[in-house]
């Protein structure tokens, strides 16, 4: 639904713009020296020979005009001469002087913009608009004309296919959806030759893409190529000299395309066929809260795939300007330097990125708190566990780039006056930011629509109905484009093989057959297919899953399969198994994943290799990735088959969830019950909704997760409990759950109902965990209680995955 809203609001803007613009009847292909275009004559427009582009005066407000180049049909501006200084609707003009200077004057008086060009041949210059949308000032020579100036060298916020972004140029976003003057975001090559996004805000500036903590090599970039050129082509490939590149989701066909740095700081590629509306075919950042500055200072950003991005002030702060969050929030208190009048307010899962004043590693909580107390200007500190198991401390004097995410592992402690601490609210004043920072390029599962939708969005939802039609178009375009590419590239496999330059690729069946030595070494078997170990042509060891034909369904067409696979291929989370590629050939469908030596959680539970810390970390990592799949990534994905066999372990015993997204590949919507039962999970881990035919929501994964955690704690497998049984599928897991609940009840009631007692945990604990858990009884009790909440019968009582993460995290550094 995000795409609906984004595209529809863009459409809405386009619609408004088109009303203020009347099309040209007597336009000419060029402007000769000595002539001018007048703002008062709408027909004074330069038209490209193919008619696709127009250049002329464009209304941006009441009596305010800019000189622009736009797509003629359903006008979309792609270049502007004077975005920061619109001209008057009376007596303004663009004149090509006989000296060769092109000058835009406001109300016949001030020059607001010029090309500052001179020609050695007076009277012999000409302004033309090319078929590609480039406005070019030529000096006319008998043999070959010389280019004096061209708009492609001075982009505003948009790149057209073929237009290069170079070391000398940058894209600058609009200020907002309605204010087209220069905004806060820039796309350019930095001093290290890396193409990057920069927030250049009211007081501060910072880079946010590619993510800062990734060294350029890890982000797949190279710093050594100093040519600094990036370009999008008309079939949807983007390449940059720092080795960055991508292909759009509709890659392969010539279409109208633009790459635009939007006012929300994200880069998107928009595509359309002739008169259709634009749709998003690629975007750089899927979680808009990653973009710096959107919610301003002293605030946090939170992202929800349905409702979009929301801003809220930190507790004790209030928003400065409700209609423009980039101004941020201001304190409602005065901080005292006196330690006794200061208190800290705990904000789990809140990250304030960057601007660390003091950084210390391996430090106790009280020392970290002291670091902040000793600095009168310290406003907050972050205390978190890093990867080597040491606590680290960051103190902050400014509170910027605030973000709340179930994925963030640290806790922020906000400094407040003692008197204030108990009467501040926790993110109560949450608000939608003014623009739509949430764009999704794929369709969403409708069963989520029942969630609350604000009235702000309702307006846009009506548009989305219309956009639904375009989605269908989009899918068929993708389909046709793939077919066409295939036909075109039969002699040239390259174009078809590599869907993306990041290594996610298409393999041929014979390649994979060879890699697995004819599918001999079976390493697993699950819903949908058999997994084999193999060695890829590039020597990487892979797990190759061959999907059963009957699951795919005979009707399942290749393009649809590709569309789903490429979505899964784009997911990226440290607790998600990486998909390297796929094969779709004839009746074969295979998926290629990274191979993990340590095997699955199921095997490790059996062989007793997991101590308490490992089990806890596996639970937390799995919860994080499910929260990501459910709530943070580009598209919602339900796993639908969480079980110990699908949780693999890397060399550090960190969990990596496998088989996600398979529910999509296996025809879930097909009401054919045989297929349906294949996908609905595994006995022992299935939520009651499956059995009672209730609506399937993300809570089915929450349930399965709860069962897996109970299994990790107790060492009892829900499929084994009670031995053989004919009582139906749900009986097994019910037995495990009931057993744990009973233990809790009887143990706690013996002790007069003291709820803090962790004795009951001792009663259920897996003997293999040993005695080391003694120290962390509290943590274990939390985990067990959370697991019991997850397995509630009623799905509405179960917490969401991000709530699970928050509950577990709240004990992290206690
Ligand atoms: C647009 O934004 C600029 C820069 O922030 C500001 O100066 C100008 O007043 C805004 N224009 C409108 C119409 O709000
Ligand atoms: C809030 O921001 C809007 C849009 O930039 C601006 O027009 C308005 O004047 C601002 N209001 C205040 C009180 O600063
Ligand atoms: C943010 O809060 C600090 C005090 O914590 C204040 O000094 C600063 O002015 C605030 N920033 C904005 C943009 O209001
Ligand atoms: C961390 O600090 C503790 C206590 O000061 C010390 O014993 C330990 O060796 C430190 N660990 C590292 C890796 O520096």
Image (cartoon, rainbow, N blue to C red):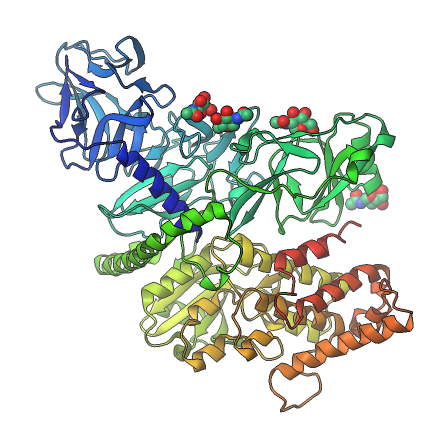
**Residue 413: x and y, percent?**
74, 40
What residue sits 56% from the left and 55% below the top?
Answer: 628
> Can you tell me which quadrant of the image ligand 1 is in?
top left
Residue placed furthest toward the right: 751
Rendered residue at 32%/36% (across/down):
16
> Measured from the top left, where is residue 35 in percent x and y?
15, 15
Where in the figure is residue 719, as x and y percent of width and height?
65, 81
Q: In this view, does 125 lie above or below 554?
A: above
Query: How many numbered marks appear?
Result: 0
| Above or below, 588 relative to 161 | below
Question: Against 148, is 751 above or below?
Answer: below
Residue depicted at 30% across the width and 23% down the height: 66
Q: Is residue 550 above or below residue 319?
A: below
Quadrant where the N terminus is found in the figure:
bottom left
Residue at the outermost left position: 142
Q: Residue 14 or 624: which is nearer the viewer?
A: 14
Task: Indicate the quadrant where residue 334 lies.
Answer: top right
In the figure, is residue 71 to the left or right of 733? Answer: left
Residue 546: quadrant of the picture: bottom left
Residue 686 visible: no
* Residue 214 falls left or right of residue 91: right
């Amino acid at each position: 639904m995000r795409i609906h809203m984004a595209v529809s609001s863009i459409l809405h803007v386009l619609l408004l713009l088109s009303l203020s613009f009347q099309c040209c009847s007597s336009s000419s292909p060029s402007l000769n020296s000595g002539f001018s275009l007048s703002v008062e004559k709408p027909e004074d427009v330069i038209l490209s020979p193919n008619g696709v582009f127009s250049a002329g005066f464009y209304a941006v407000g009441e009596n305010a005009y800019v000189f622009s180049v736009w797509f003629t049909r359903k006008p979309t501006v792609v270049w502007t001469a004077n975005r920061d200084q619109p001209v008057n609707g009376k007596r303004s003009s663009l004149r090509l002087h006989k000296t060769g200077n092109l000058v835009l004057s406001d109300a016949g008086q001030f020059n607001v913009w010029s090309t500052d060009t001179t020609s050695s041949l007076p009277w012999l210059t000409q302004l033309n608009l090319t078929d590609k949308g480039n406005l070019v000032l030529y000096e006319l020579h008998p043999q070959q004309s010389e280019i004096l100036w061209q708009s492609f060298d001075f982009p505003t916020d948009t790149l057209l296919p073929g237009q290069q972004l170079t070391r000398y140029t940058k894209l600058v976003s609009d200020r907002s959806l309605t204010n087209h003057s220069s905004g806060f975001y820039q796309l350019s090559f930095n001093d290290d030759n890396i193409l990057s996004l920069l927030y250049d805000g009211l007081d501060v500036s910072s880079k946010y893409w590619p993510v800062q903590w990734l060294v350029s090599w890890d982000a797949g970039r190279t710093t050594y190529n100093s040519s600094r050129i990036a370009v999008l082509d008309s079939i949807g490939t983007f390449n940059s000299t720092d080795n960055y590149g991508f292909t759009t989701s509709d890659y392969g066909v010539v279409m109208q395309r633009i790459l635009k740095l939007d006012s929300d700081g994200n880069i998107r590629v928009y595509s359309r066929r002739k008169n259709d509306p634009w749709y998003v075919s690629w975007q750089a950042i899927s979680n808009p809260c990653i973009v710096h500055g959107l919610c301003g200072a002293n605030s946090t950003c939170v992202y929800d795939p349905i409702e979009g991005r929301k801003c809220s002030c930190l507790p004790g702060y209030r928003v400065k300007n409700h209609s423009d969050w980039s101004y941020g929030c201001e304190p409602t208190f005065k901080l005292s330097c006196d330690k006794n009048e200061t208190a800290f307010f705990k904000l789990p899962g809140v990250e304030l990125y960057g601007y660390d004043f003091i950084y210390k590693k391996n430090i106790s909580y009280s020392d970290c708190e002291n670091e902040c107390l000793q600095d009168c200007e310290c406003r907050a500190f972050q205390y978190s566990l890093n990867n080597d198991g040491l606590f680290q401390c960051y103190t902050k004097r400014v509170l910027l780039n605030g973000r709340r995410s179930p994925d963030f592992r640290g806790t922020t402690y906000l400094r407040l006056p003692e008197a204030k601490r108990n009467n501040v609210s926790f993110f109560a004043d949450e608000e939608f930011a003014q623009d739509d920072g949430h764009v999704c390029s794929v369709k969403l599962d409708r069963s989520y629509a029942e969630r609350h939708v604000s009235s702000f969005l309702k307006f846009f939802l009506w548009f989305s109905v219309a956009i639904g039609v375009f989605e269908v178009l989009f899918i068929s375009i993708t389909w046709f484009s793939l077919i066409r590419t295939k036909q075109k590239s039969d002699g040239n496999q390259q174009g078809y093989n590599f869907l993306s330059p990041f290594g996610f690729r298409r393999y041929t069946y014979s390649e994979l057959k060879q890699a697995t030595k004819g599918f001999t070494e079976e390493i697993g078997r699950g819903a949908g297919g058999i997994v084999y170990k193999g060695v890829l042509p590039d020597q990487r060891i892979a797990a190759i899953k061959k999907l059963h034909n009957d699951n795919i369904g005979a009707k399942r067409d290749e393009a649809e399969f590709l569309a789903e696979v490429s979505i899964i291929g784009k997911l990226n989370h440290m607790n998600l198994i990486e998909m390297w590629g796929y094969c779709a050939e004839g009746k074969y469908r295979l998926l290629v994943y990274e191979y993990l030596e340590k095997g699955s959680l199921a095997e490790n539970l059996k062989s007793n290799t997991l101590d308490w810390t490992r089990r806890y970390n596996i639970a937390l990592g799995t919860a994080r990735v499910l929260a990501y799949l459910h709530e943070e990534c580009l598209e919602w994905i339900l796993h639908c088959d969480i079980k110990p066999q699908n949780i693999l372990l890397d060399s550090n015993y960190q969990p990596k969830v496998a088989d996600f997204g398979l529910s999509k590949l296996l025809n879930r919507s097909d009401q054919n019950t045989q297929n349906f039962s294949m996908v609905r999970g595994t006995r022992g881990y299935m939520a009651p909704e499956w059995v009672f035919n209730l609506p399937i929501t993300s809570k089915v994964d929450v349930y399965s997760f709860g069962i897996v955690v109970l299994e990790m704690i107790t060492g009892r497998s829900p499929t084994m409990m009670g031995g053989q049984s004919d009582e139906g599928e749900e009986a097994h897991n019910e037995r495990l759950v009931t057993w744990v609940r009973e233990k809790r009840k009887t143990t706690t009631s013996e002790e007069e109902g003291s709820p803090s007692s962790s004795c009951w945990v001792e009663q259920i604990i897996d003997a293999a965990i040993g005695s080391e858990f003694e120290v962390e009884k509290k943590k274990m009790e939390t985990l067990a209680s959370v697991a019991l909440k997850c397995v509630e019968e009623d799905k509405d009582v179960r917490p969401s995955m991000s709530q699970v993460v928050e509950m577990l995290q709240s004990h992290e550094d206690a």
